[in-house]
Amino acid sequence: MRVIASSAGNFLRKHVYVAFILPALLIYVVFLVYPLLSSLYYGFFQWDGITRGAFMGLANFKKLLAESPYNVRFFSALKHNIHFFLMTMAVQNLVGLAFALILSRGIRGASVYQTIFFMPYTMSVIVLGFLWSLILNPTWGVFNKLLATVGLSGLARPWLGDMATALPAITLVNAWHWVGFPMLVFLAGLEAIPAELHEAARLDGAGGWKLFRRITMPLLMPSITIVTILTFIGNFNAFEIIFAMEGSSGGPYYATDVLGTLFYRTAFGEAGGFSGQDIGLGSAIAAVMFVIIFAISYLGTRFMRSREMQY
Amino acid sequence: MVPAQSSIRNWTRTACTTGLHVMLLAYSIVVLYPFFLMIVTSFKSTREIFFSPFGLPAQPGFETYLKVWKNASFNVYFANSAIITGVSVLLILAVGSLAAYGLARYNFRMNTAIYLFFLAGLMLPIRLGIVPLFLLMKNLNLVDTRSALILTYVANGMPFAIFVLTGFFRTLPGELEEAARLDGCGEFMIFHRVMLPLIRPALATVTIFNFVPLWNDLFFPLIFIRSDALKTIPLGMTLFFGQYETEWGLLFAGLVIATIPLATLYLFMSRQFIKGLTAGAIK
């Protein structure tokens, strides 16, 4: 016993770094790496409740991608994720870029505006989601009443209950929540561009749009890459905003169902969707999501990096 | 001619700046009005909410707040959020800075490999491991405990903490360590007494970067927590909204209570919040 203890002591004296690194490594491997890797192969098994059964190859994946109604739900959720991402890029990130361009011109009160625009970012999705669903409520909410006050009552509708407007409405609420982040990333990117470059171009006669297109945009590419990839990862992991505003089935009638809600319902069981809990199918969804998110964010980063320039 | 031209140019510039200010002010209203509405409505009666949605409350009353405080267990939710977030952040700082120090200050064979292994976690969609993680917690008898959340959060916090803290530890001069060693300090003492105090700014960044998302998290509590006595504020909110669906004054009062802690912190520390939360994306 004492021999073992003293040899362990010797080992630690020589390799003291092990004692420093071990706790972190242990927690990280057990509670993050192991679950994540397991989620990639759980989908290849049959599951009886929470007990793992026989290996069944690609059966769960076939069911997900080729068997109705599972494939209908899956591809509709995937489509909603893509729409959600594209609309977020067009609204949230363009608005963020516009604010960054305005604030980088040294306008008075810039830091106050910055603080205000970033404020929602620090709050929880569930609180803001609930707040906005009360505001958008068709009978009680102030949004439609506001439209009526300015004479636009014809536009009023149940924004979150109408299949055509539900996902765009959620995209706007989501953009309102997070827009401070792309704004600050772009602002930092703009501040890093040397002022001489702009001056030199202006002396050469470039102005306004040309200056932006030829100088600012290319030099802002690193920030654009980061914002695009993080938006993609965020949107394809989306769950809470839909859960808060439309419930776990992504109502009305699955119009806002995304991969995150589909995965949650399938793996943990909930009213609506497929009845009960199906861990095999749920894990198959997780594995497909993992591959999509990892592959696209990896390839996307490489592609966009290749278009960045040095100065 | 020349002065006229320059005054026209001045005029256009002023007009342009004014236009931009109008835009920025308009969007400020878009951001702030929902919060204003939330506070005002929380003091209204149900009748008032319906018939004068934009007006100020006729007789502002605290009944809604008293009722929320009595009937919903926000004090319990608040305590749970504080304990879970607080312990998780402290452990992330402790465990993360130890590992970062080991990686930054000692040379050994697997060093770079282990560092990259931790960094990989920054890129991975961690939530997708939730099914195996849930089964693991079940086997460890940790489902419906605060520990399930704390362990998950600490594991999730490692990649960023190690990324930031290792970078900082590497910038410290080696002479410091050697001098302390000559004075007879042990390795842990050097870490704790000499090096750790020097990376305080990095520790602040890691704190805020983790504190805000953990405080706001719904996903993991939704999966792991069942008992009302263990619910956090976001999870408690979902319960509360289910129960008082029709009592709008109460709902808004609940939202105000849930918003106050972080909003107050943000008001006083907005600079640190912004710096901490955008760290990683902004160098």
Image (cartoon, coloured by chain):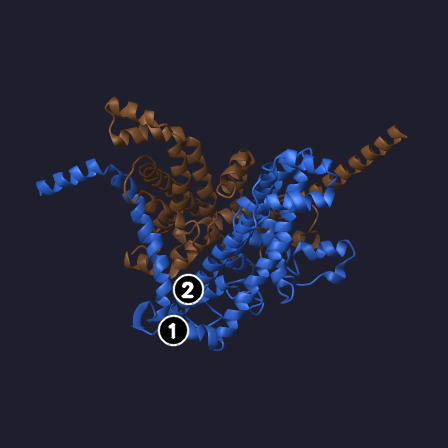
The structure residue drawn at horizontal position 51% and vertical position 66%, both measured from the top left corner, is A249
Tag count in the figure? 2
Q: Which mark is residue B221?
A: none
Residue B260 in sight here: yes
Residue A234 in sight here: no
The structure residue drawn at horizontal position 27% and vertical position 32%, both measured from the top left corner, is B188
Q: Nearer the viewer, residue A134 or B157?
A: B157
Q: Which mark is residue A58?
A: 1
Where does residue A1 sit, x and y in percent of width and height?
9, 43
What is the drawing colour of chain B? Answer: brown
Identify the residue position indicated by label 2 in the image. Answer: A287
Decide which of tag 1 and tag 2 comes sooner along the chain: 1
Quarter of the image that includes the C terminus of chain A: top right
Whether residue A43 sits left or right of residue B24 in the image: it is left
Residue B134 lies in quadrant: bottom left
Amino acid under disc 2: Ala
Whether residue B80 sits left or right of residue A311 in the image: it is left
What is the drawing colour of chain A? Answer: blue
Where does residue B57 sit, x and y in percent of width and height?
67, 45
Q: Residue furthest bottom?
A: A68
The structure residue drawn at horizontal position 64% and vertical position 66%, both measured from the top left corner, is A162
Whether residue B262 sits left or right of residue A114 in the image: it is left
Measured in 3D between alpha carbons, the distance from the residue under mark 1 to the one under mark 2, in whole angstroms, is 12 Å
Whether residue B26 sits left or right of residue A184 in the image: it is right
Where does residue A227 sit, x and y in percent of width and height?
55, 49
